[in-house]
Amino acid sequence: MWTRTSVEFDPYMERKAFDETKEGVKGLVDAKITEVPRIFHAPKDALTDKKPSVPDLAIPIIDFASVHVDTASREAVVEKVKHAAEKWGFFQVINHGIPLNVLKEIEDGGRRFHEEDPEVKKRYFSRDLANKNFVYHSNFDLYTIC
């Protein structure tokens, strides 16, 4: 008996088709999908008995206030950045000196870009990471995930 889930599934081809839309997950949302595409499903055995890799789930906060005080202080900040990047992959920076209005404009610019017409965004879509201009793509690991 054939069911929807028994249809032959080629993850590479589905990822490629998703990637070629150049619209990313927002394109799926805009299309009002009702089911998560199979390429985003994790195998059940990959999800069982998993414990958080970090039991304390507080995002690292790194204070840049002392970065220009002296060499030792700067090295301490660099070490904190290195540790957070290696262990977490991201972190929050405080006392960095970037004015709030600039941060707000960066956030607004990102939002405006992602709300832009898909045809406009497609001009910037690229997986060429050597490109020094602005590029945009979905799921950096799209072709390496299981």
Image (spheres, rainbow, N blue to C red):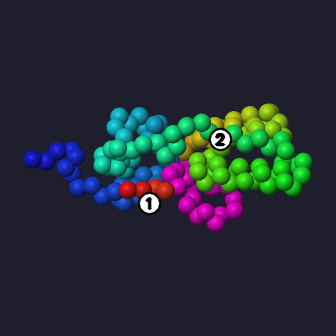
Q: Which residues are magenta?
A: 119-140
Residue at image point 49% right, 46% down: 53
**Identity, as a three-letter code, of the amino acid under mark 2:** Pro
Residue 4 in the image, given as x and y percentages of width and height = 21, 44
Label 2 neighbour load within 10 Å: few <14, some 14-19, many 20+: some
Identify whether 41 is placed above or below 11: above
Residue 7 in the image, given as x and y percentages of width and height = 21, 51
Identify whether 16 is placed above or below 92: below
Q: Is residue 138 magenta?
A: yes
Kindly identify which numbered label has been placed on residue 5.
Answer: none
The residue to which callout 1 is attached is 144
Residue 115 in the image, given as x and y percentages of width and height = 59, 37
Q: Is 7 positioned to the left or the right of 96 in the image? A: left
| Callout 2 secondary element | loop
Label 1 neighbour load within 10 Å: few <14, some 14-19, many 20+: few
Q: Nearer the viewer, mark 2 or mark 1?
A: 2
The residue to which callout 2 is attached is 60
Residue 38 in the image, given as x and y percentages of width and height = 33, 47
**Identity, as a three-letter code, of the amino acid under mark 1:** Thr
Give 113 or 88, whichever is nearer the viewer: 88
Give 94 or 72, whichever is nearer the viewer: 72
